Amino acid sequence: MGSNVAFPGPFWQLTDVKRYNLDIDSNPAAITYPSTNAQVASVVTCARTNNAKVQARSGGHSYANFALGGADGGSTVVVDLKNFQQFSIDQQSWIATIGAGTLLGDVTKRLEQHGRAMAHGTCPQVGIGGHATIGMCTWMLQR
């Protein structure tokens, strides 16, 4: 994957790890930035081959730093989903399909372009991947 992976080094915590909760020291083994499903599959295969845990990161908004593997994340390979920004909306059914790396602030803007909205909190940097897995992954967007 070349430059699509980051390993511990200078400025690692600031540029790649970006801990949400600074009180919990989370240091994953690597952070990957795939842009295709095939690259995600390769990361998972490589991690499994090397007995590492895999954790998806949509926005990274986790009080326990779960997107980094939590406090025991040292053997975790993070799959950062920021490159998965797909968005489409069926204007007949009003079902939206939203890429897991899309942040809620961006979801709001894209839905507004179609005269639609979605209930969510006030934190625009929350990733839809984590937010949507709390309930359902596809919503019927009502007027």
Image (tube, rainbow, N blue to C red):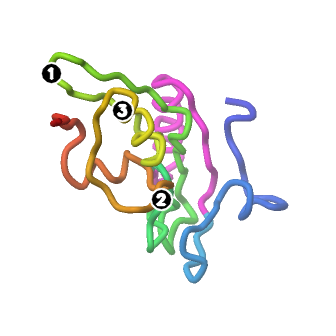
> What label does residue 67 carry, if any?
2
Q: Residues within 10 Å of mark 3 (few under 14, many from 20)?
A: many
Q: Quadrant of the C terminus?
A: top left
Which residue is disc 1 drawn over?
A: 93
* Of pointers 2 and 3, the one earlier in the residue sequence: 2
Front-lying residue, 34 or 30: 34
Q: Amino acid at mark 1?
A: Ser
Check disc 3 and report its element: helix, strand or loop: strand
Q: Which residues are magenta?
A: 28-55
- Please state which amino acid type lies under the numbered disc 3: Ile
Is 56 within the magenta?
Answer: no
Crowd rating for badge 1 (residues with CA inside 10 Å; few <14, some 14–19, many 20+):
few
Residue 24 in percent (x, y) is at 55, 79
Residue 59 x %, y %: 49, 52
Q: Which dot marks residue 98?
A: 3
User: Which residue appears at 46% of the width and 25% of the height?
Assistant: 37
Three-letter code for the amino acid on which mark 2 is drawn: Ala
